[in-house]
Amino acid sequence: MWHYLTRGAGDDRTVHEAQDAWNRYRLRPRVLRDVTSVSTGMQLFGAWQTPIGIAPTAFHAVLHPDGEVATATGAVAAGAPMVLSSRSTRRIEDVAAAISGPWWFQVYLMRERSITAALIERAAAAGATAMVLTADTPYVGHRARTAALSRPLPLSDEQALTNVQQHLPEGAGDYWDLIDQRADLSLGDIGWVADIAELPVVVKGVLRGDEAAACVDAGADAVWVSNHGGRQLDRAISTAAALPEVVAAVAGSVPVIVDGGVRDGFDALVALALGASAVMLGRPVMWALAAEGAAGVTGLLDELTAELRHAMGLAGAARLADLDRSLVTGH
């Protein structure tokens, strides 16, 4: 599991560049501003106390007995956005029951579309407030170390199939073939997901301005700048470098979300100043979940939010709306 989480695709170049890319930015703080009270509250397909949230990641039960239920409980306590993965090891309805507010559901378009449609319908019925269509995974990137292991993950079929088992066609042979990602995704699939869910659709995996604009034109309600944690196309551009181009391309028409290499409140401040509406975490949440379950997740999110709030005050920003491109230089 350690190898599965830490490794990226290819030679891990994109993984290794992620954090340094944020570190290359520098801040230009404002002074003589009233920052007696600094707020990190925001609205984005729901009301949140922090713009720092949880990106969709798979198979949480391998890290903690309560799996995604613990992750959700931790997110709720921190007032943070959470995106539940299609590869959850706990039932959609059980995770939703642990969330007292809004949450989002991540969608993989599987080779058997009826399974994807069923998951979307269940998530919408359980209270999801947005669908996150992952667009950068027509097939899984090659990860040499885990591919060489006889069993890449300590995961039972029962865990892996928690949410899809009931939707498999009767007499299905190789069910893994049915639930693998489709390689024929198109812009039209944005509308397909929206029609089923009747909810906003966020397109995740965008690294180019022209692609972001095309997604918006096709009906996306938000775009998510992500290179899948470096786990898909190695040598892909860092999200810190891609974010300004995407923000410029959508020109305020939809919110922009970003993940990848964010490790503290200063990274989050840079991302928000560059135009992101929310900043999502992947691997750090996994470490926190493994260490302390729900309390670990809450502690992580609270600490990063406190760090963000402190940095905002020092930069002269009392609200998230006060963060803008003029506060950041470099790269």
Image: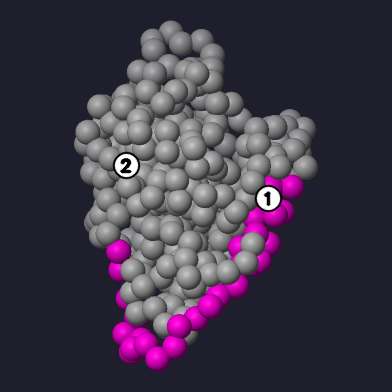
Q: CA distance from mark 1 to mark 2?
A: 28 Å
Camera-side residue of 313 and 59: 313
Which of marks 2 and 1 precedes in the sequence?
1
User: Where in the figure is residue 154, as x and y percent of width and height?
Assistant: 62, 39
Regarding mark 2 in the picture, which secondary structure is present there?
Answer: loop
- Amino acid at the residue labelled 2: Asp
Residue at the outermost top position: 171
Q: Which residues are magenta?
A: 13-42
What's the image's color scheme? one colour
Regarding mark 1 in the picture, which secondary structure is present there?
Answer: helix
Quadrant where the image shows the C terminus? bottom right
Quadrant where the image shows the N terminus? top right
Q: Is residue 281 visible?
A: yes
Marking on residue 223: none
Instruction: Report which residue position mark 1 lands on.
Output: 15
User: Where in the figure is residue 196, as x and y percent of width and height?
Assistant: 26, 27
Camera-side residue of 120 and 270: 270
